[in-house]
Image (cartoon, coloured by chain):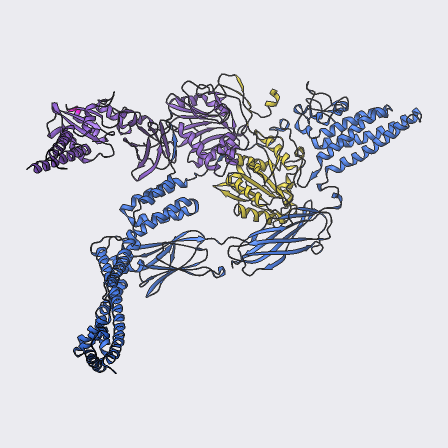
């Protein structure tokens, strides 16, 4: 092996060794840089904490959360980042030559190493090269690379920043553990918990940082929440709310409205409360200091239920058969049961019985929506004609309280007609039968009269007279039945065809003229009603409606029938059926109109009594007594009340911040239910207070939400436009 | 319009300061209205309205329409009648629209007078009607028998007058001593009766002449109360 | 040597230009003019500070001037005005003129009045007369409340809450005003027949905080009494509400009540008769039915039965018109003696409460409340009418004129003031001369 080759081989070996040294040193320097950055950052954080504690305690300057975050975290991070960047951009690159120099510094005999690493071997003369190689090989084999030496170098590089980092970390931990809660408490409670009493500083730690755990009721299957330092909690009614803080519970008191709550715990205190139905404030007090937590309940909504079928109310002709019931339901948390409720009512008049039956119950295991279908057989329920069935769907949610209301659907009424109602859905049979019997009789009588008229040419005059008078008798009978009904309605008296005369003190709106009944007492404007006059158009029958008493008006068709029957009867008495027939037709038509008018439907018109006020006015035997009215209550304008409360709280902010904050919390609580915009605006005020920010802008917004100034344009000549 | 027509309401013709007669414009008269609802038999006492109107005219000088009105609870027209009468035998289940109208009606100052035509405390009407009122307006509470309602015109020392239907054993065989009510701002918003006035007052007014004591007098108290409170 | 002269010329030019700019931008606040007159400029209302007052005091009392001329950019504040007024009374000649706005008088005239609402719940009505286009802001001791751009020579605010002091500011003037306490009388006498209108009116007034006395006739010799009706006078009642002819029997007493300061609300039913005709604001027209569906609209009163107020009395003031064709008068008011009468054309207002929109109950009550506020007797009205020697801060410009007289530039801008505002010409001449000399010198020596 020549000298150059030997030198080359030795140089390569040296280079490899130097590369390993270089890598080790580079890692050492990177570690050193990171340690230095971290140590600087932590030192900066310690300084930031120390300064903030000094400012807050010694100088009594209130610091906001933002200021604290800036001093405690943002600036230290920036310092650390700056150090890192500085080291990165100004690092001394670990080159093989530098590594060799570093090595040579520690092993002076290895001076050839630098030359070997630095110079190109080929550029050396073979003699020099081989000499160097030999020297380097000896040095290298003797001392290179000493691991202990490297480790020592690394330790030397790292120990200072590591020590600084460790000590600064311990300091920071200590500051945050012991000193910071005091400051945090001051910040959290801001002006609220501070009454200026310096001795309160120690105990205020206990209210400073609190944690709130919210466990929704188990049936809700919702996860628990953990919150830190919140001023309000929104949770399901019935949720368990646990407020926890550091320190002994001795001397702490907690209240909600007028209710005293127990505070327990030795190392850390805690207050347990159940989310009420209405907004409430939990106040935890520690001597003169207090802190409040607003509880905002979220109600568990009742299930929403829709009855899909039957779609509408129905009347069934037959009690056999069935109907499909189907319903759907939704709930915000989960459903437990979906069923149908049927109330079957039987009876009439004053005797009714009702059965309530639950059908098609379907268990729903917590699903938020469900559907149920059930085939309702009428036979199973033993439905009878005349029965009424009210059907609705019910859904119960997972709420465990037994008295919990169920969600219900709209109700459908299914009615089963009686046999005598098949022609219609009439339920009141009282007036129609009389009219119906008259109708049938009148129609038969008309038929008989027409037949008599058709036979008139073929029969003798005597026969005609006898048969005609017999029909006249029948006609009179029907007429009396009609008159009985009219009088029953108008006067309540059963006897028919009696009339009264002006001045007899017993006016019921009917008077007799030439045997006929005429509405009202013979005023000049009242014309005598005749069949001929009423024949033209039924609408003309009411021509005189404005002149007659209202009680007569609704009985007018029957009056027309009565009078037409009178004319028909007179013609029949005179054995003139041809003359009688038009009157009889008129009577039939009038009875048909009366029947149509009087038919009482389940959801239609009912027979109304029209009272003759003039007749009964002050006719009562009894007299009443004077009475005094109890004054009504003044409706306090919530807006005005809130406005005044806000003004007072705003004025107090300067004088007594604790009281002002409490007033604002209470105001927000009250406004939650009836003034959402104000509540939202007050939330901003409280947030600003909590953060120690300027509250002017949110206060102005809250005030505008309350005052709602009404502006108008123009100048009025009146003091109040 | 003739003078006779104007005189239907006493006091319409008045003398002024100068002694001259002046016609007062027609006052808006009281209308006795019966509430229609989808479920049940709302029209179970068809003669009652006329009878009550007769009673009002018989004992007071209040302007009153001679004929009652029927108004659907699912229509805003119900709000035109600040006193509404509701009765029936069958279960009462208000539709959602009826429920909304009832809530608005009560909030705005209307008085809903409900009478159980069954006078049966376990009856379907009672159970469902009280449930529905509690759901929509609030729970019904017993009305004290010294309430101003019982002295607003006639004096009923013992509270609501007893009906013959209670005494003769119809229904639940009970004499209900108190009416129930929902009150708002010290005013009755919903008046509920188990007395079955619907049966007691459901006759033609002319039949009063056969009665020693007019059973409908209590209706005047209800109407006077509604008109002045 | 030559170049040094050129340098000197450049320096002189620059210094002259700088001085001119400085004097243009920052004119001297107190200057002296000939004839022993001090000129004080740019006095503004918003910037009424100690420095301005000190400048005035210094000018008047320490510099030995016998006259003061103010150039104002906006109406000076209350203290400044008072000081100048005092100086004028003490013998100094004080003269003022507008420094910026040639149309100063028109642009700055605002006047404010505040009236405590005669209402159980209190409240204040603030009226402002201001030029159209003026931006006004309203504030009180707690801060800003509202702002508005005047579009019809004035504006007003209706504010709830306790009576307090208010501040109305325009760009050129600031006015402050305080509302007086309201009347302690909170009783109303109602005359009405038994019916839904009287019942719901009673409910609305009681809910609004009024105590209402009324007798409702039920039957001959039977009535229901609300409150304790008694003799109608201003010691007992703030206003009388007459719904119908029930009031006619007491027409003479009502007349005396109104003339002695009481308020009266008339409806078509009560205004129609001759008994109350001497008090009414106008005649009673023909009745019109309510417009179907309007009760739930933005104009709910149009849904009410309506009898227009016609043939207005010469001193009647129209308060509201119907939106119907021809804009008939719906509400009119007039003063009768010391009292006030309002005549309303709407009838059966209870239908609004029952059939109106979602807030109908509150709207109906507030409407009635506003009707009573316009007429109800207030015990402090007489106190407010006491003689005031000066307009005060409620009308700042009027106060300035009343104290110091009209502005010297009432008929046009002052040339001297305008000249003062421009940079001094001689400085520009010096700068130009120096520059020309420098340029000339360089040309002569052949430099570029």
* Location of residue B165 with respect to A218 vertically, above or below: above
Relative to C350, is C96 on the left or the right? left
The quadrant holding residue B24 is: top right
Chain coloured blue: which letter?
A
In the image, residue C89 lies in the stretch drawn in magenta? yes
Q: Colour of chain B?
A: yellow
Q: Nearer the viewer, residue A435 or A113?
A: A113
Q: Residue C215, image x and y in percent?
A: 48, 30
- Residues shaded magenta: C88-93
Q: Quadrant of residue A604?
A: top right
Q: Is residue A20 magenta?
A: no
| Residue A595 in sight here | yes
Give how far across and how far down residue A230 sits, in percent.
36, 55
Whole-percent x, y for residue A38 in the image: 26, 65
Residue lying farthest to the left in this orientation: C1
Image: A187 above or below C72: below
Where A508 falls versus B114 (above or below)? Answer: above
List x then y, in percent, for residue C239: 41, 28
Q: Color used for chain C? A: purple
On the rendered structure, is A69 left or right of C273?
left
Side of C7 relative to A603 (left or right) = left
Q: Residue at x 27, y 72 (%)?
A: A23
Q: Nearer the viewer, residue C367 or A223?
A: A223
- Screen quadrant of the N terminus of chain A: bottom left
């Amino acid at each position: 092996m020549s000298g150059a080759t030997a030198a080359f081989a030795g140089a390569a070996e040296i280079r490899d060794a130097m590369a390993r040294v270089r890598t080790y040193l580079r890692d050492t320097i990177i570690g050193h840089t990171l340690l230095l950055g971290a140590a600087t950052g932590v030192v900066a954080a310690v300084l930031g904490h120390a300064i903030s504690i000094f400012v807050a305690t010694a100088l009594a300057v209130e610091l906001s959360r933002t200021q604290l975050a800036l001093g405690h975290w943002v600036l230290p991070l920036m310092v650390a980042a700056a150090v890192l960047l500085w080291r990165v951009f100004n690092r001394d690159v670990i080159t093989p030559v530098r590594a060799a120099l570093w090595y040579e510094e520690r092993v002076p005999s290895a001076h050839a190493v630098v030359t070997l690493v630095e110079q190109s071997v080929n550029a050396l003369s073979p003699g020099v090269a081989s000499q160097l190689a030999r020297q380097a090989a000896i040095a290298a084999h003797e001392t290179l690379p000493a691991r202990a030496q490297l480790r020592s170098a690394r330790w030397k590089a790292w120990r200072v920043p590591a020590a600084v980092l460790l000590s600064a970390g311990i300091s920071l931990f200590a500051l945050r553990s012991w000193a910071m809660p005091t400051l945090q408490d001051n910040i959290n409670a801001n002006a609220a918990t501070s009454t200026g009493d310096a001795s309160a500083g120690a105990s205020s730690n206990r209210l400073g940082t609190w944690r709130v755990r919210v466990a929704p009721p188990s049936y809700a299957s919702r996860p628990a929440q953990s919150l830190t330092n919140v001023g309000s909690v929104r949770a399901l009614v019935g949720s368990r709310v646990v407020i926890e803080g550091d320190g002994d519970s001795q001397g702490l008191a907690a209240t909600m409205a007028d209710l005293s709550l127990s505070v327990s715990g030795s190392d850390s205190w805690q207050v347990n409360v159940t989310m009420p139905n209405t907004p409430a404030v939990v106040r935890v007090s520690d001597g003169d200091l207090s802190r409040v937590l607003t509880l905002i309940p979220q109600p568990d909504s009742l299930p929403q239920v829709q009855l899909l079928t039957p779609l509408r109310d129905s009347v069934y002709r037959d009690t056999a058969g069935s109907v499909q019931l189907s319903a759907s339901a939704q709930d915000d948390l989960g459903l437990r049961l979906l069923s149908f409720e049927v109330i079957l009512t039987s009876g009439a008049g004053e005797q009714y019985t009702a059965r309530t039956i639950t059908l098609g119950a379907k268990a729903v295991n917590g699903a938020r929506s469900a559907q149920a279908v059930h085939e309702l057989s009428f036979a199973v329920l033993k439905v009878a004609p005349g029965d009424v069935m009210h059907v609705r769907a019910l859904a119960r949610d997972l709420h465990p309280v037994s008295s919990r209301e169920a969600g219900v659907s709209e109700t459908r009424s299914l009615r089963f007609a009686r046999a005598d109602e098949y022609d219609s859905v009439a339920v009141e049979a009282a007036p129609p039968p009389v009219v119906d019997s008259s109708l049938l009789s009148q129609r038969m009588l008309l038929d008989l009269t027409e037949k008599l008229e058709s036979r008139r040419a073929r029969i003798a005059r005597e026969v005609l007279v006898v048969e005609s008078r017999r029909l006249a008798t029948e006609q009179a009978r029907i007429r009396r039945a009609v008159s009985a009904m009219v009088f029953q309605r108008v006067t309540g008296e059963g006897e028919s065809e009696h009339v009264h005369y002006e001045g007899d003190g017993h006016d019921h709106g009917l008077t007799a003229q030439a045997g006929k009944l005429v509405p009202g007492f013979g005023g000049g404007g009242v014309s005598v009603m005749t069949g001929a006059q009423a024949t033209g158009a039924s609408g003309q029958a009411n021509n005189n409606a404005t002149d007659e008493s209202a009680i007569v008006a609704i009985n007018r068709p029957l009056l027309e029938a009565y009078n037409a029957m009178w004319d028909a009867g007179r013609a029949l008495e005179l054995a003139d059926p041809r003359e009688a027939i038009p009157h009889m037709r008129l009577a039939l038509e009038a009875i048909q109109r009366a029947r149509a008018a009087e038919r009482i439907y389940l959801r239609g018109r009912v027979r109304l009594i029209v009272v003759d006020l003039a007749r009964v006015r002050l006719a009562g035997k009894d007299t009443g007594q004077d009475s005094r009215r109890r004054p009504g209550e003044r409706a306090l304008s919530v807006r005005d009340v809130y406005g005044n409360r806000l003004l007072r709280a705003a004025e107090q902010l300067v004088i007594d911040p604790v009281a002002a904050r409490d007033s604002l919390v209470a105001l927000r609580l009250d406004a939650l239910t009836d003034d959402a915009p104000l509540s939202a605006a007050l939330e901003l005020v409280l947030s600003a207070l909590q953060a120690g920010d300027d509250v002017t802008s949110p206060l102005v917004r809250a005030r505008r939400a309350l005052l709602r100034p009404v502006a108008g344009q123009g100048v009025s000549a009146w003091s109040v436009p | 319009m003739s003078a006779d027509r104007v005189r239907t309401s006493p006091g319409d013709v008045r003398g002024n300061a100068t002694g001259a007669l002046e016609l007062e414009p027609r006052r808006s008269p009281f209308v006795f209205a019966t509430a229609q609802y989808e479920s049940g038999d709302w029209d179970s006492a068809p003669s009652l309205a006329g009878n009550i109107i007769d009673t009002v005219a018989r004992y007071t000088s209040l302007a009153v329409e001679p004929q009652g009105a029927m108004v659907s609870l699912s229509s805003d027209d119900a709000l035109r009648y600040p006193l509404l009468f509701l009765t029936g035998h069958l279960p009462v289940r208000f539709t959602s629209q009826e429920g909304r109208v009832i809530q608005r009606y009560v909030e705005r100052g209307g008085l809903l007078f409900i009478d159980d035509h069954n006078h049966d405390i376990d009856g379907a009407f009672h159970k469902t009607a009280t449930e529905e009122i509690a759901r929509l307006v609030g729970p019904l509470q017993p009305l004290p028998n010294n309430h101003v309602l019982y002295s607003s015109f006639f004096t009923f020392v013992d509270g609501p007058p007893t009906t013959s239907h209670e005494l003769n054993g119809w229904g639940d065989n009970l004499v209900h001593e108190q009416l129930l009510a929902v009150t708002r701002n010290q005013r009755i918003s919903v008046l509920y009766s188990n007395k079955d006035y619907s049966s007691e007052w459901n006759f033609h007014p002319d039949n009063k002449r056969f009665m020693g004591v007019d059973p409908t007098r209590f209706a005047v108290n209800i109407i006077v109360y509604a008109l002045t409170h | 040597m030559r170049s040094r002269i050129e340098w000197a010329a450049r320096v002189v030019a620059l210094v002259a230009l700088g001085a001119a700019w400085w004097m243009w931008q920052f004119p001297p606040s107190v200057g002296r003019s000939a004839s022993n007159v001090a000129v004080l400029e740019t006095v503004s209302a918003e910037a009424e500070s100690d420095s301005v007052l000190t400048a005035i005091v210094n000018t008047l009392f320490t510099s030995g001037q016998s006259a003061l001329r103010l150039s104002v950019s906006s109406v000076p504040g209350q203290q400044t005005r008072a000081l100048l007024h005092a100086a004028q009374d003490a013998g100094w000649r004080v003269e003022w003129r507008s420094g910026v706005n040639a149309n100063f008088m028109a642009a700055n005239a605002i006047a404010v009045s505040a009236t405590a609402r005669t209402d159980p719940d209190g409240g204040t009505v603030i009226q402002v007369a201001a030029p159209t286009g003026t931006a006004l802001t309203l504030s009180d001791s707690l801060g800003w409340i509202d702002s508005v751009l005047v579009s019809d020579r004035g504006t007003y605010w209706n504010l709830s809450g306790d009576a307090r002091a208010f501040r109305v500011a325009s760009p050129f003037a600031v006015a402050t005003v305080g509302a007086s306490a309201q009347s302690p009388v909170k009783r109303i006498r109602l005359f009405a027949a038994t019916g839904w209108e009287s019942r719901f009116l009673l409910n609305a007034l009681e809910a609004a905080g009024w105590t209402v006395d009324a007798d409702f006739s039920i039957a001959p010799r039977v009535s229901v009494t609300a409150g304790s009706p008694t003799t109608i006078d201003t010691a007992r009642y703030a206003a009388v509400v007459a719904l119908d002819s029930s009031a006619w029997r007491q027409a003479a007493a009502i007349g005396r009540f109104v003339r002695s300061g009481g308020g009266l609300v008339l409806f078509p039913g009560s205004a129609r008769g001759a008994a109350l005709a001497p008090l009414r604001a106008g005649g009673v027209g023909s009745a019109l039915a309510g417009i179907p569906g309007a009760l739930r609209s933005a104009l709910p009163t149009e849904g009410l039965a309506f009898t227009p107020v016609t043939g207005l009395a010469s001193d009647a003031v129209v308060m509201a018109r119907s939106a119907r064709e021809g804009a008939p008068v719906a509400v009119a008011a007039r003063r009768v003696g010391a009292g006030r009468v309002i005549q309303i054309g709407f009838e059966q207002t209870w239908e609004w409460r029952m059939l109106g929109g979602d807030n109908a109950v509150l709207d109906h009550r507030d409407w009635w409340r506003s009707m009573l506020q316009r007429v109800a007797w207030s015990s402090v009205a007489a106190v407010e009418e006491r003689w005031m020697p000066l307009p005060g801060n409620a009308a700042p410009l009027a106060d300035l004129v009343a104290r110091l007289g009209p502005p010297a530039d009432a008929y046009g801008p002052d040339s001297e003031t305008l000249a003062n505002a421009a940079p001094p010409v001689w400085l520009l001449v010096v700068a130009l001369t120096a520059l020309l000399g420098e340029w000339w010198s360089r040309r002569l020596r052949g430099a570029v």
